[in-house]
Each structure stands twice: as C-alpha cells, then as structure tokens.
Image (cartoon, rainbow, N blue to C red):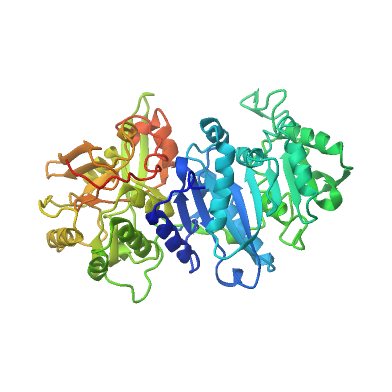
Amino acid sequence: MNAILIPSALTRTFVATLLVLALSKRAIAAPAAIETLDAGVRMGMDLPTGSDVDPKRPTVLIVYATPNGSTVEQTLGGKAAEGAAPLDWRFDIQHIGAQTRRLREIERRENIALAVVQPAERSWPAFRKAHADAPRRERAIVAAAAQRVPGKVAAIELTGHSGGGSFLFGYLDAADTIPADVRRIAFLDANYSYSDEARHGDKLLAWLRGGASRTLVVIAYDDREITLNGRKLVGPTGGTFRASHRMLDRFGRDLTFTQGTLGPFDTFEAMNGQVRFFFHPNRENKILHTALVGDMNGFLQAMTIGAPEAGRWGSFGGPRAYTQWIEPIVNGGIPDRPSGAIGGAAFMEQVAPLPLDEREARIAGEFVRGNAPAFLRRFKPITITATLADGKPHTAEVRVMPDYLAVGGDADFVRVPLTPRTATRIAGALGCVLPTRKLVDEIYRQAEVKLEPRPLTENREAVATFVQHNRIIETQRAGRPLGALVAGIKKDVVVSNRLNEKPRRVAIYGWQKPDGAPIQPLTIVHNDRYVDYSHGIRAVSSNVIVDGKAMDIANVLKDRVLCALLSDEGPMEIAPMYAAPPTTAPATRP
C-alpha cells in the first residue's frame, strides 16, 4: 500500500479536511475531495450528506473507473451554471454524480459512498501498459478509497464504463481470488478485455458462489455493425457484444441461463439473479456506447439489480431518471464563506510557526471550506485568437480567477503562496488547473488592473513576509475594485513541459513589469517544496470554449494544433506534472 499512496502528512491532512467538507452542504457538482495518488491517478470522493447518511446504517462504497478520455469531474457530470460558459460534452454523458444522488434517495437501508478513479493517462488500458504491476496498484487504489470513507465499509461495489473495464479486470488479475468484501461487479459496456486465458470467468464464478448477495452485471449492445464516417468501428473479433458472449459461453459450461426481455434489452439470467446480462439488440446500428450509461440509466440499473430498489427509480432504456439531480458546475466552485470564519491576517499569524506541511494543510482546509474572499468566486474571461499551424484562425475563451488564491473575507484577506502540489490539489477540487506561461502573459495583457512589482529581499520564505507583501499590494491597489482582473503583483506557479527535464521541481514564471517583460523567466531551479512570498496561485477553469465549442483544457493542451492557443511550449500532458510525491529535500534557493 505504501508504494501506491502518497505518504505525506500534507496529503493525509488535506484529504481529511476535504472529507469534512463533504459532510457539509455543497452547492456545486464536484467531488468533495480529489486526491492524487502515485502515478498521477486521481481519486474523487463523493460522500453522502444530510439525510443520506445515518451512522446506524451500513456503508457501501462504489468504486467507478472512468472511461477513456474522461476526467473525474466529467464522469461525475453536471450542467453549466446560469450565465457560465458551456461545458465540455463529456460532462453530459454519464452523470454518475446525479445517478448516485438519485440512488441515495431511494436506497434508505445503506449509506452510499462513491469513489471515481481516473489515471493520468485518462485510459486504464494505457495505465496497465505503462505499469507492469498495474493489478497490484489497482487493488491498492480500491483499498485507498475504502480508507477515505468515515467509519467501516460493509461492502464494495466495482463498476466502470468503456476503458474503465480494464481497471476491473486488472483488479481480478491481482490475485487468484476476489476479496470477500466485494459485493457487486458491473461492466457498463466495458468488458472488452475479458479473457478465458486469464481465468476471469473462473474467478468470477468462484466469487459468485461464495455468497448469495454477490452480483455480476454486464450491460452491452450489438456493436458489430456500427459505423462512423462510413467505416466500421469494431473489428471482426472486437467489441463488447462479442466479449459478453465469450463470457456467456464460459459461464454456460457451469450455469443454466434463463432468457427474457426488459424494455428494449434482451436478458440472460442465472444463479437466481446473481448473474445478469443485458444486451441492446441495436437494430438501427446506432452508437449506443455512452447512451447505455447515461441516457438509458445504465448505472442505476446495474447498482439496483437484486435489491428492493430495482425499478423504483425509473426505466432501464430511458428516459433519464435523474435529471432533477443534475447540479450546476460554477466556475470557481468555492463554497460559501462560513459565518464567523477567521480573518486572513489572524489566520496567517496562527499558521506562521507551523512546519511547511502542517501550514499548507491548514491553508488548504480554510480555502476549501469556503474561507476565501467573495471576489475570487467570480472568474474572468480572457479571449485568445490566433492563426495556427493548420492555417486557420482559432479562438479560445478561458475563465480565470481574477486574483491570486487568498484566505479570509473581502475586508480581511491575505494572498497565500503555496507549493505546487497543494496548489494543484486545490485547483483540482475546484475543477481547475494551474496556468501555462502563455496564459500568464495573456492574463497580464488583458488585466484590468496592472500594478508594478514590489520585490522584497529579506526573509523571503517567512509567513510574516507573505503578509507584509500582501499589505504592499493592497496599498498599491487602493481605489481599484475588488474582483477586477489584476496582474503584476506575483510570479505564477505554472505547468510547463520543462518539468519533464527534472523530477520534483516547481515551475515559476512572470511578475511582469509595466512594459510587460517578466522579472522571472520560466525556471525550474527550485525543488517542489520551495515557496516564497512572491509566488502566486491563480486557478484556471478546466472548461474552455474553442471556436464556440466547449472543451476540457487538458484536451486542448494535448492537441498538436490547438495547444498553441494556450501554450508556447507545444503540446502538454499536464495531469502528471505535480503528481509525483514531493522531494524530501529541504527547500533551497540558488
């Protein structure tokens, strides 16, 4: 386990704080806690709140493996808040968050916790190719999720969509037996890599026979003849329809199946309902891959098979049974500030004597529980237009935090420099990322308030200097409105391809002078535990509008053409950049 989980005190305290946040009322459709494990795996925890949690009820943990191409946030799903920019289409195809909220409403016998797990590669098959010990890692990820749930987990249910099935089979591959606390395994059009040679069928049968409450669910559709742009999408031996029938053939050697129908689906059932296969015949040869999960309520169907709640939530096959449970995603996503929250100056005085890890965990805790100035919640749009390598003009609209991350209220806040790992975790919890060098330049160019840098030279790493520099900035800013897009006051902690040159470094850039030239060229000279008064953390929304279409910023940065809108370093793979455990070396300056 220790080889998989990040062992730092900062991570443990940070996640504990986010889990406390999960027990309060949330106003945004985002996981209550997003944690980055080893190898860049992201885990989003969505815990029951209010009347959905009762300490007298047993707790069930659902672990959902993301499909190829989707993030934790997109898998949970949501809708654009009123007046906000449109969301990437991936936010509207699974809605595992809304379906879980619907499930909690009808399931009153158990507390339902949800963990959504996503590899840095956004592909579990790619993750397994990259890591020879992937099965062991995948079991450890499930164990880590169970550890994050308050109280004892009575049962675990494993599910996933598309490439997420590779995670489930990897979990099976880790040992000869499936753990006894696993109660349900559900493949949501996800069983591409089923293998008799790997003894997947043998293991599943042995597990099913170990308890009458254990359930295997397979949902698929006839994908053999589907086409896109006139070409078949599935090869002569591929697809989930063929994989599902390979499973049926294997189970059929030991079990007797009863055939039937349910809505538009053909059904195969055995072991008194412990084994259920659902096949959509797809006579119109449509691409139903994601529709099975979201539009047809596949997740709700799979999670209620064999339970009293089966069928009480709506109809398998559609229409959506969870529409009213879809929550808006607000750019900035910071909870309301609690009444009586401590002011920024007083808080910084409290944390000043603490070691770095404890200090940053306290700062993160204050921010994610909402102790942040209101003006930071109103993100600002910046527009970038350029003719790119394809010879065509392109436009991107990016929404950015108007100022740097701060703790306190509008009348008493302090901007707080942070190490890149803490900054990345906070940004991820808000559905955001850190900026690139090009974005820092664009923010300065389009800033409504440009202030002249005021460098300090003594006690650069002291909290007292953080507070002193904040006072200097506020003196400069006097007379200008809070919430205006401001620049010229800090260097930015950024994402950069240069982080691939040396592990465990922080990339810093910016602090432009009035002529636009940066005081700090892009550098990775410091290790990732170094932080001083001049470092600023500005969150950038993951939702970007490119040529009128909503896209995830990570996909834009990976695109060989479109990346030039947001990056002057070429394509970027930002997910792993600050995912490695921090260096244990002390912070140093050149």
Return the x and y of residue 418 as percentages of the image width and height: 28, 53
Quadrant of the rendered structure where residue 554 is? Answer: top left
The relative height of residue 473 versus residue 388 in the rendered view (above or below) is below
* Residue placed most toward the observer, 221 or 134: 134
The reply, left or right, for residue 327 in relation to residue 582 is: right
The reply, left or right, for residue 332 in relation to residue 22 is: left
Q: Residue at x 40, y 65 (%)?
A: 369
Return the x and y of residue 253 as percentages of the image width and height: 87, 36
* Residue placed most toward the observer, 579 or 4: 4
Quick check: can you spot residue 248?
Answer: yes
Count of numbered badges drawn on the protein: 0
Return the x and y of residue 237 as percentages of the image width and height: 72, 25
Quick check: can you spot residue 278?
Answer: no
Q: Residue at x 23, y 37 (%)?
A: 523
Q: Residue at x 13, y 50 (%)?
A: 453
* Residue placed most toward the observer, 250 or 440: 250
Pick the quarter of the image with the C terminus. Answer: top left
Q: Residue at x 42, y 33 (%)?
A: 558
Return the x and y of residue 374 as percentages of the image width and height: 32, 65
